[in-house]
Image (cartoon, rainbow, N blue to C red):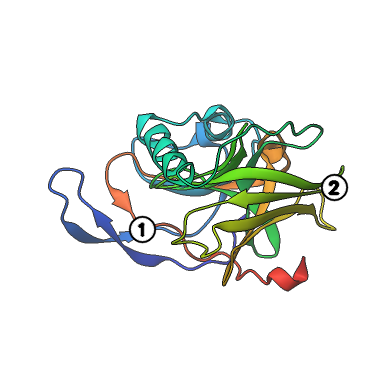
């Protein structure tokens, strides 16, 4: 079964010299098992296995030294004005993976560059991992129920003049789909997410590139957060 998405020309970065090259990349998304594909070459496909190496990689992902260094740096900046303290948060998932929507269906995206964006509620902080890490400190649990959590955060002045923010994660009408929002003084971040242990309930769009950098897939449905 093939999704109705046209072939396009993508820019790729040569792994040898870092230059931009124009190559015709087949961007027709086909539902496939990665075991049937040549992973020595770029592959863009919909993984429907729910247990492939790509699912396992997301499930087993751990922060590297760069990520840990970034987390420690931001926490050090926040701790200049706020004493970090652990919060005991029970009965609510701690690690969240972002979801995309493709042809009106929720999917996980395995990116060519970096990692699938994720949020982690750690002991003292909310850690956001993507190409670069970002962090806010936990301050106070405002609400904690089976379907919703609200946590007051402390952050840096560049993100919020009051150095405060509010994290909300709440269940939507869709199975295993949640809306995550972080409200700062003058702006708000919103993401559609699922607990990492639930990713097997979704297909995965895999943009696998082991030789050259391929532009990230950008033909997902536009997100209307008011829907959630």
Looking at the rendering, in which quadrant would you find the N terminus? bottom right
Crowding around mark 1 (Cα neighbors within 10 Å: few <14, some 14 to 19, many 20+) is: some
Position of residue 183 in the picture relative to residue 178 (left or right):
left
Q: Is residue 47 visible?
A: no
| Mark 2, residue position | 147
Q: What is the C-alpha distance between the residues marked 1 and 2?
A: 36 Å
Q: Could you tell me residue 228's position as x and y percent?
A: 77, 65
Q: Could you tell me residue 2's position as x and y percent?
A: 59, 57
* Residue in the image at 38% along x and 47% along y: 113
* Residue in the image at 49% along x and 59% along y: 28
Q: Could you tell me residue 203's position as x and y percent?
A: 65, 46
Q: Is residue 139 above or below residue 19?
A: above
Considering the numbered disc 2 on the image, is that residue within a helix, a strand or a loop?
A: loop
Q: Could you tell me residue 168's position as x and y percent?
A: 72, 54
Viewer-proximal residue, 173 or 168? 168
Q: Which mark is residue 215?
A: 1
Viewer-proximal residue, 62 or 162? 162
């Amino acid at each position: 079964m093939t999704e109705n998405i046209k072939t396009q020309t993508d820019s790729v970065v040569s792994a040898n010299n870092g230059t931009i090259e124009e190559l015709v990349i087949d961007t027709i998304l086909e539902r496939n098992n990665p075991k049937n594909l040549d992973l020595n070459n770029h592959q863009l496909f919909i993984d429907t296995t729910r247990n492939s190496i790509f699912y396992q990689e997301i499930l087993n992902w751990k922060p590297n030294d760069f990520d840990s260094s970034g987390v420690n740096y931001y926490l050090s900046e926040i701790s200049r004005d706020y004493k970090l303290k652990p919060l005991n948060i029970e009965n609510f998932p701690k690690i969240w993976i972002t979801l995309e929507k493709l042809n009106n269906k929720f999917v996980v995206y395995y990116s060519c560059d970096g990692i699938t964006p994720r949020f982690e509620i750690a002991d003292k902080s909310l850690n956001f991992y993507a190409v670069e890490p970002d962090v806010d400190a936990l301050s106070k649990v405002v609400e904690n129920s089976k379907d919703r959590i609200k946590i007051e955060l402390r952050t840096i002045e560049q993100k919020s003049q009051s150095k405060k923010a509010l994290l909300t994660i709440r269940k939507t009408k869709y199975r295993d789909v949640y809306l995550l929002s972080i409200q700062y003084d003058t702006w708000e971040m919103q993401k559609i997410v699922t607990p990492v242990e639930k990713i097997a309930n979704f297909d995965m769009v895999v943009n696998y590139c082991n030789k050259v950098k391929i532009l990230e897939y950008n033909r997902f449905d536009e997100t209307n957060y008011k829907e959630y």
